[in-house]
């Protein structure tokens, strides 16, 4: 039983990103990315949940630095994915696909 090592940051980040994606109703990533009460609430809820999960499943305690970095990386990752998805929906590369679907 020890502190989770820094090389597991991607694992914790991925786990938190999945948890954020499960939130119902869906969070507004644009608002959340800029900071909001929703962000504060999710931070408290999910960082606590992650700590409990890692302790129960792996028998290790996550350091506050790891859990904090993982949470904000997860938010940034989801926000960037959302931006890229939005861009791809209106890009010229996808116009031919839209034309095919509308025929």
Image (cartoon, rainbow, N blue to C red):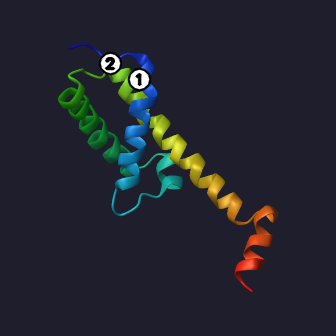
- Check disc 2 and report the residue beneath it: 4
Residues under numbered marks 1 and 2 in contact, where contact means CB atoms less than 8 Å apart: yes
Measured as percent of width and height from the top left, residue 43 is found at 34, 40
Who's the residue at 63% across and 57% down the image? 85
Q: Quadrant of residue 6?
A: top left
* Residue displayed at 41% across by 23% down: 8
Marks 1/2: CA–CA distance: 7 Å
Q: Vertically, is 11 above or below 20?
A: above
Q: Quadrant of residue 23?
A: bottom left
Residue 66's spot in the image, x, y percent?
39, 23
Q: Is residue 41 above or below residue 62?
A: below
Pointer 1 residue: 8
Quadrant including the C terminus: bottom right
Residue extending farthest to the bottom is: 103
> Up-down: is 61 above or below 76?
above
Q: Quadrant of the N terminus?
A: top left
In the rendered view, does 60 fall on the left or right side of 83? left
Q: Residue furthest left?
A: 56
**Callout 2: few (<14), some (14-19), or many (20+) C-alpha neighbours within 10 Å?**
some
Q: Percent from the top left, x then y, of residue 62? A: 30, 23
């Amino acid at each position: 039983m020890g502190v989770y090592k820094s090389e597991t940051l991607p694992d914790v980040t991925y786990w938190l990103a999945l948890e954020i994606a499960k939130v119902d109703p869906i969070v507004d990533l644009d608002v959340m990315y800029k900071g909001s009460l929703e962000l504060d609430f999710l931070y408290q809820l999910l960082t606590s949940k992650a700590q409990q999960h890692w302790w129960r499943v792996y028998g290790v305690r996550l350091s506050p630095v790891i859990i904090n970095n993982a949470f904000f990386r997860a938010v940034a990752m989801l926000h960037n994915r959302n931006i890229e998805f939005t861009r791809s929906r209106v890009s010229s590369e996808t116009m031919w696909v839209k034309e095919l679907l509308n025929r």
